[in-house]
Amino acid sequence: MAVDKLNYLSDKVRNMAESATIKMAGMARAMKAEGKDVISLSLGEPDFDTPDHIKQAAKQALDDGYTKYTPVPGLIELRQAIVDKFKRDNNLEFTTDQIVVSNGAKQCIANICLALLNPGDEVIIFSPYWVSYSEIVKFAGGTPVPVHADISADFKVNAGQLDAAINPKTKAILFSSPCNPTGSVYTHDELTSLVEVIDKYDNLFIISDEIYEHINFTDAHASIGTFDAVREQTITVNGMSKGFAMTGWRLGYMGAPAWIADACNKVQGQFTSGASSFGQKAAAIALSTDLKPTKEMKVAFLKRKHLVKELLDDIPGVVANDPKGAFYFFPDISYFFGKSNGILTIDDANSFCEVLLQEANVAVVTGSAFGDENCFRLSYASSEETLKEALKRIKNCLSKFS
Ligand code: PMP
Ligand code: GLU
């Protein structure tokens, strides 16, 4: 039987874009395997190792026999540690039946979208946005509605823009603060004005992705779920990947109204079951012990941020904001569009990234994957030495375009 393989795949999968972050990281890895000296600033992944006491806790859990299925929403001791963490760090009140632990914050967002969305439902996504938001919303049957703020607004959507985008089909609002890819952080005052708008609508849910909470240089992380007006309408997503350097462990969690947590629990029960048992034991320790390693990583990220900002500002044509959190820069590089080095021409953000990869051997991610065609994303979760070398290569490469 001759199968038309491409057309045989589901429409859902054919219409889904590949994750640009993961694709770029894969390309860089493949070039390295071919012996090329590629620097990858493409993936948002702390270069630090998981702190030792967390690794020890996982080893201990294995020795203690934590090798079996867990309850789908997570071990009760982890859910209690999450309840305590939400109270301690975010002033958010939950009970353990409102918590669902998943295989990464990515799965939390997928669970939520699958649990909430019907065809025709719209989800307002603050843009620039993390690559997977729009694809997850689409896969779940919803329609992503990006509401965009550019670099002149420090990439932050205002209340007027939000109000104008809400219509009877709007079911949810999805955003991250600190933001991937821009590093922007919504202040308490900015959240207040967004809440005033959302408060006018009862059927609107907020999906607040706070996975970069601990990498916030303002020291004032604000959770939108603390506002009384939207408390019952907010789902707070977080995870172990960024703040605890645990990307490979695949552990994320959310706090939500109990009926939404129940629905996510049902979805997860059919797709993946509970997250890894010994990983959950270690996460419970990570969340309830000293945050010293997390704070040390933040200090290192801040130092790197200053370094990269200085080096980016030194490249004519590159315009970078001053990110207040996460570990990304999202510079505007529209100055280079139409410019050539005699061999290659930079037409847009995609070709800008191709040029950097081919000519400078530096992998970064195109802004178009994050909803902004004028920008590219650079992750500075690498050593200072690597960052200096990468920025030197980028500057040198771009100096040849006129
Ligand atoms: N949200 C944002 C904003 C992210 O950058 C990421 C990338 N890791 C995730 C969610 C998903 O994280 P994970 O699945 O590793 O917990
Ligand atoms: N969230 C990280 C990033 O934006 C990891 C890769 C991914 O899951 O997209 O690079």
Image (cartoon, rainbow, N blue to C red):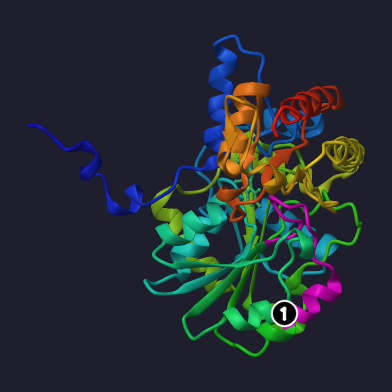
Identity of the residue drawn at 65% across and 63% down: 175
Q: Tell me the quadrant of ligand 2.
A: top right
Q: Quadrant of the N terminus?
A: top left
Return the residue found at the far bottom: 200
Q: Helix, strand or loop at disc 1? A: helix
Towards the viewer: 212 or 271: 212
The spot of residue 193 in percent (x, y) is 78, 81
Q: Amino acid at mark 1?
A: Ala
Task: Look at the image and tell me whether residue 288 can be seen.
Answer: yes
Horizontal side, residue 326 vs residue 31: left or right: right
Q: Is residue 394 above or below residue 75?
A: above
Horizontal side, residue 351 vs residue 143: left or right: right
Return the residue found at the far left: 1
Q: Is residue 400 above or below residue 227?
A: above
Q: Quadrant of the C terminus?
A: top right
**Snapshot quadrant of residue 173:** bottom right
Give the crowd class for mark 1: few <14, some 14-19, many >=20 residues within 10 Å: some
Towards the viewer: 360 or 65: 360
Range of magenta residues: 176-195
State the residue position of label 1.
159
The spot of residue 224 in percent (x, y) is 75, 71
Horizontal side, residue 132 vs residue 292: left or right: left
Identity of the residue drawn at 51% across and 77% down: 171
Residue 110 magenta: no
The spot of residue 8 in percent (x, y) is 20, 43
Towards the viewer: 232 or 401: 401
**Snapshot quadrant of residue 352:** top right
Task: Look at the image and tell me whether residue 66 can be seen.
Answer: no
The spot of residue 184 in percent (x, y) is 78, 57
Identity of the residue drawn at 45% across and 68% down: 143
